[in-house]
Amino acid sequence: MSEVLSFDTVVVGAGQAGPFLAAKLVAQGQKVALIEARDLGGTCVNRGCTPTKTLRKSARVAYIARRASEFGVELGPVKINFAVAMERMQRRVDESRRGLEGWLGNLKGLSIFKAHGRLAGREGADFVVHAGEARLKAPHVVLNTGTRPWSAPITGLAGHPFLDNESLLALRERPDKLVILGGGYISLEMAQIFRRLGSDVVVIERAPRLTAREDADVSAAITEMLVAEGIEVLTGVAVQEVTSGDTPGGSCVVLSDGRKVQGSHLLVATGRVPNTDNLGLDSVGLKTTERGYLDTNDRLETQVPGIQGAWRHQSAQRVHPHQLPRSRNRCRKPGRRTPERRRSDQDLCDVYRPSIGTCRAVRSRRQTLGRPRQTDLSSRTRHERCQQSQRRERDRGCNQTSDR
Ligand SMILES: Cc1cc2nc3c(=O)[nH]c(=O)nc-3n(C[C@H](O)[C@H](O)[C@H](O)COP(=O)(O)OP(=O)(O)OC[C@H]3O[C@@H](n4cnc5c(N)ncnc54)[C@H](O)[C@@H]3O)c2cc1C
């Protein structure tokens, strides 16, 4: 067995918080280990915010170009070079990751382990953490292991080729028809992007409305926006089975009401689960919430002194906690329309995450504080509060809701 390397802090997972925390700790003179199983930057940089916001820019350019004549600009037919758009996206991702790698690689006192990290009990006052073959120990451990896509248990899905947010972004040929299961923020953002890049898109959501956790008026505005762009939205209908489609490699989604939806590609965006199942939490007596998240207090401490999470997961907080406080975009009310600015002019991530998300975050904070819920999305005070909250959060760090 290899020798045990001692650190002041071991950070497992180099997503949003891990790298910055590690940098801060080494700046304070600590010896820190940062363990990352895949790519530095985690989901956001490699598989989430950065690629989608880059691709969204291509989609937006296509959308505006198609409407150019409305603005007095004659362009002729708009052709999409999907592979070029995807390669541009990948270049941005690579640049971002390389920037992070370069910065972290030069930090004195920081050791980066590219391996799966796993708690392996205690040695005196220290926690033992395995990073692949290496054995590390430290009195403090921070877990920033994030989430991964989860696919709903649907008959036929397991043996069927389907895409998640990562494999969708790895495509270099545009799907002719993209069928999307799930009506949450990842699904809808992809729906709008791929529609604007020229795919036919169908979104299937089991709940009676899209973004079912948001207020009804918000769901309605989003649905209207997507339908106006030619996206087919089917809500309130369960998926009975997934089978092979008529086209080679295609899919057929059989709905509970008997309808069949054929597509060349199937994206399953039915949720995400925390990466806590293979972390050795038992070895230190750490329990998760029912849904597998770390249970932390306001100081991000777990029940085991010395082990911290990267953020607080609250059951009342329904929007992914990390995406909201980071919003940089202005608060936009989905319903605001002018002749020049149609509802469908807006990109989903403008409408959905910043305004709704922040409002919901405000609401969940109010609930936590035991204050009554405020539901009027359009109220001036709420809008102002959104803006105020975003101004505050803007100072805290990166967000990827803007075009790239
Ligand atoms: C398609 C998509 C688009 C998104 N768009 C936006 C957006 O525009 N704006 C926004 O704010 N948010 C967006 N998000 C959400 C954002 O990506 C997440 O909120 C954010 O990445 C969460 O950060 P994290 O640090 O918790 O987890 P992650 O970024 O997932 O990082 C966790 C890291 O831990 C590593 N890891 C896990 N287990 C281990 C282990 N045992 N050992 C070692 N390493 C481990 C993983 O490999 C990963 O690198 C988007 C998400 C997706 C999927």
Image: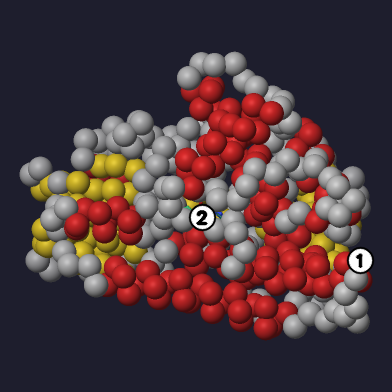
Quadrant of residue 42 in the image?
Answer: bottom left
- Front in this rendered view, residue 240 or 27: 27
Quarter holding the N terminus is: bottom left
> In the image shown, does 170 or 261 lie closer to the viewer?
170
Left or right relative to 113: residue 399: right
Image position, residue 213 (x, y; %): 67, 36
Gap in angstroms between the C-alphas marked 1 and 2: 32 Å
The kind of residue on which mark 1 rests is: Glu
- Image coords of residue 242 (percent x, y): 77, 59
- Residue with the mark numbered 2: 399
Q: Position of residue 297 (x, y in %)?
A: 35, 31
Establish if 42 lies above or below 308: below
Name the residue furthest front.
72
Question: What kind of residue is marked 2?
Answer: Asn
160, 284: nearer the viewer: 284
User: Which residue is identified by label 1?
Assistant: 70
- In the image, residue 325 above or below residue 290: below
Q: Nearer the viewer, residue 297 or 344?
A: 344
Q: Position of residue 162 (x, y in %)?
A: 68, 66
